[in-house]
Amino acid sequence: GQQVMQIPQYQHVQEGEDFTTYCNSSTTLSNIQWYKQRPGGHPVFLIQLVKSGEVKKQKRLTFQFGEAKKNSSLHITATQTTDVGTYFCAGPTGGTSYGKLTFGQGTILTVHP
Amino acid sequence: EAGVAQSPRYKIIEKRQSVAFWCNPISGHATLYWYQQILGQGPKLLIQFQNNGVVDDSQLPKDRFSAERLKGVDSTLKIQPAKLEDSAVYLCASRYPGLALGELFFGEGSRLTVL
């Protein structure tokens, strides 16, 4: 079945360093979403990308959707301790018009002060 | 606006016992999802409802899991009998009606421990 893979599984950085997580799909996606889950919390929506090659920014976060719409990345500039958590990408799979969403396994980010 | 409500937040049971989780989505959200999240993994879709109809339950272990969404609002997820490997957080999420795009709103989750 369709898979959404993320790398790396873990990333440990010093505060102020940059962080990037990558998401790859086995098939072309119509759109991709990113979520953040704080330790002990639930996933919270960050952004949705729809267009091929799309780049969106939210303050220190930069999101990209690949030209072939099979990969995406999230880059955080100058990490802060508040960035700690697990970052998930999610893509629609299953071919339904109601949006079955498949999540990647996530990248766990720890930030050392 | 009120978020997605779930209960109970925590449940500890012994294997072979039964458990039920309840979810109340955001008002007006026709699409409702139940996800299972095992520690260290991404959420895995168990079942998706559109109003009170099942859209996808291909990953629901139907020999022990059941879910319903009466009247297209609240939903319950039941496990009977529970196995050790069912220990996980069960997340309910909802989405605006009729959209294939758009964010999922998650509840706080129900953490199940099976001993």
Image: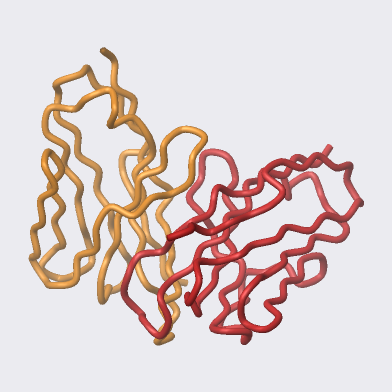
Chain colours: A orange, B red
Q: How many labels does the image show?
A: 0
Q: Position of residue A96 (x, y in %)?
A: 43, 85
The residue at 43%/64% (across/down) is: A102
Left or right: residue B72 versus residue B10 is left
Picture coordinates of residue B88, whole percent (x, y): 65, 46
Return the residue found at the far top: A113
* Quadrant of the image occupied by residue B23: bottom right
Q: Is residue B80 left or right of residue A30?
A: right
Q: In this view, does A65 lie to the left or right of A85?
A: left
- Residue B45: x and y in percent read 55, 64
Q: Quadrant of the C terminus of chain A?
A: top left
Residue at position x 28%, y 54% in the image: A23
**Side (left or right) of A27 relative to A41:** left
Residue B114 in the image, given as x and y percentages of width and height? 80, 42
Q: Is residue A33 above or below residue A31?
A: above
- Front residue of this view, candidates A23 and A32: A32
What's the residue at 19%, 27% (across, down)? Answer: A79
Decide: is B100 above or below A112: below
- Residue B66 vs B38, above or below: the answer is below
Q: Residue furthest front?
A: B1
Front position in the image: A41 or A12: A41
- Frontmost residue, B20 versus A111: B20
Res. B61 image quadrant? bottom right
Q: Residue at x 31, y 44 (%)?
A: A7
